[in-house]
Image (cartoon, rainbow, N blue to C red):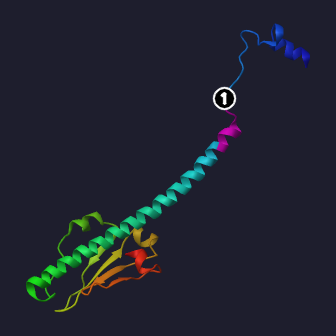
Amino acid sequence: MKAILKRYQGIGGAPRQGVRQQSGFTLVELMVVVLVLSILAGIAYASYDNLTIASRRKAGAACLLEASQFMERWYTTNLAYTGAVVPALACQGDLTGSYVIALPTPTATTYSLTATPAGRQATKDTKCGTLGINQSGTRTKTGTGSLSECW
């Protein structure tokens, strides 16, 4: 062993010229870093996914409120909800693929608007499901979450 050490050391224990010491990461160290990063990425993606589902839900609720305001303007002008058709609102373009805003046939004194989740929103947002609002401002939902969580 001493012979090997003398071979790599010069006088006084200093490294000989021409012999470089290796530096860098071992494969184990690199794999630990990859493992930690993948765990953090998994947590971050799940959190991002939940936040996008919740933000689309809030956008769907806001679009329902905008459609409800249109219905009230229609009633103010015509003194009945009959004949009203929700126009193509700007918010509906933002919700394409996430929610479908529908107005079943209104009566003279009542209406009921719904925002039905579509696509990925329908499979991921089981907490709230279909959102609804009627002429008296009563808000509804079909999922398992509370009304305050959904609206």
Question: In the rendered view, would you say 47 is above or below 65?
Answer: above
Residue nearest the observer in this picture, 80 or 28: 80
Helix, strand or loop: magenta stretch: helix
114 shown above or below 25: below
Q: Is residue 41 left or right of residue 54?
A: right
Of the 4 image quadrants, the one containing the N terminus is top right
Q: Is residue 2 left or right of residue 108?
A: right
Residue 49 lies in the magenta stretch = no
Residue 15: x percent and y percent? 76, 13
Q: Residue furthest top?
A: 11
Q: Position of residue 4 (x, y in %)?
A: 87, 16
Percent across and percent down for residue 134 are 27, 85
Q: Is residue 29 above or below residue 5?
A: below
Q: Which residues are magenta?
A: 25-32
Q: Position of residue 79 (x, y in %)?
A: 10, 88
Number of numbered discs present? 1
- Please tell me in which quadrant of the rendered image residue 129 appears: bottom left
Give neighbour class at mark 1: few <14, some 14-19, many 20+ (Cα, 10 Å).
Answer: few
> Residue 7 lies in what quarter of the image?
top right
Residue at 32% x, 68% y is 59
The residue shown at (51%, 60%) is 46
Amino acid type at image mark 1: Gly
Residue farthest to the bottom, as pictured? 108
Question: For residue 94, what is the image quadrant?
Answer: bottom left
Q: Quadrant of the C terminus?
A: bottom left
**Residue that numbered label 1 is attached to:** 24
Q: Is residue 93 left or right of residue 21?
A: left
Badge 1 element: loop
